[in-house]
Image: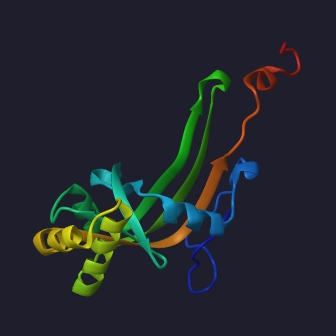
Amino acid sequence: MAMWWLNSKGASPMTERPMRRKDRQFSAADARAILAKGTHGVLSVVGDGGWPYAVPMNYTVMGTQIYLHCARAGYKLDAIARDDRVCFTVVTQAQVIPAHITTLYESVVVLGRAQVVTAEEERLAALGSLIDTLGDVTPEIKAQYLAKKAKNTTLLRIQPLQITGKASRSYVPVTQRMAGPGRQA
């Protein structure tokens, strides 16, 4: 399993389960590259009554931290205030191959702890980076947006504790997968 961040003793804070499809596992460096090129992911939090709650969000990566933005109040913020453990999942390069009943993809799953960013300099840097990830925005429009919206925007920081990456970049034709003992191709 690709480990990106470790605790002070050099061990993962989570129970490690080996990836079943080792042929699809990739390195921590590849996982970082996929995170860096992505723009959208799904944030999962521990919701009311311990039930999972997942919401799609755009994000940016600065250093080893993942940043997301949201409104000043809401369910996910309430959940994070109660329990800061989160899972953040990114899928890129998803391509369905209907004729072979398969999907090619790259994915990253991050387990970590989320916090609301309170330092104004960090908030503005993260929000500016988020704007940059969403496309070609002129410096003037970016400055106007930050001046108008930054005060009403909450920034979340995920401190990753574990990262895993998995990809299916090629496929076996469905006729070959179906063939086997007692089966016809």
Residue 119 seen anywhere in this rendered image of the structure: no
Q: Quadrant of the C terminus?
A: top right
In the image: residue 67, left or right of residue 169: left
Q: Residue furthest right?
A: 181
Q: Quadrant of the N terminus?
A: bottom right
Q: For the point 60% across and 61% down, which residue is it?
A: 164
Q: For the point 59% across and 45% down, which residue is it?
A: 105
In the image: residue 83, left or right of residue 88: left
Q: Position of residue 108 (x, y in %)?
A: 55, 57
Residue 144 seen anywhere in this rendered image of the structure: yes
Colouring method of the image: rainbow
In the image: residue 125, left or right of residue 38: left
Q: For the point 57% across and 67% down, which residue is it?
A: 32
Q: Position of residue 23 (x, y in %)?
A: 76, 50
Q: For the point 33% across and 55% down, which residue is it?
A: 57
170 or 17, nearer to the observer: 170
Quadrant in the picture for residue 40: bottom left
User: Number of marks in the image?
Assistant: 0
Q: Position of residue 132 (x, y in %)?
A: 35, 67
Quadrant in the picture for residue 169: top right
Q: Position of residue 20 (x, y in %)?
A: 71, 48
Quadrant in the picture for residue 130: bottom left
